[in-house]
Image (spheres, rainbow, N blue to C red):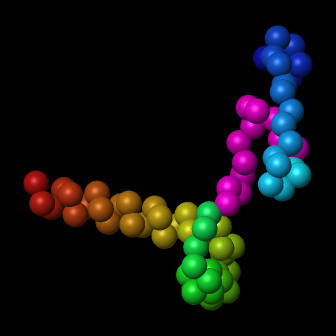
Amino acid sequence: MKAGVGQKNHLTISSHSGIMTTMNSQQLNPNIRVTPQTRKDLKMIAAHTGETMLEVVARLAKQELERLKEQKKSSC
């Protein structure tokens, strides 16, 4: 379906950031709160691996999820 044909595109303005987004769009880099030390750790990992901090978080989360799945398999 083409944009604007049969679709309503409601615009909103975030009161916190002043960024205009559509109601049906997804924020690519959502905010996540971490401690200052965790942020430093992520920054160091990113510097050593050549990844962005966002890529590091995604990779670590995926690795942890896989570890938990394997742990669950071995306990059954």
Q: Residue furthest left?
A: 76
Placement of 65 over or under 36, stated as above or below: above
**Residue at image coords 47%, 64%:** 61
- Residue 26 picture quarter: top right
Decide whether residue 23 is among the magenta residues: yes
Q: What percent of the width, then of the height, locates residue 45?
A: 59, 84
Left or right side of 66 for 74: left
Left or right side of 71 for 7: right
Q: Main secondary structure of the magenta part?
A: loop
Q: What percent of the width, then of the height, locates residue 59?
A: 52, 67
- Tell me where the magenta segment starts and ends, as one range: 20-31
**Residue at image coords 60%, 68%:** 33
Quick one: quadrant of the N terminus?
top right
Residue 49 visible in the picture: no
Placement of 50 over or under 54, stated as above or below: below
Q: What percent of the width, then of the height, locates residue 23?
A: 76, 33
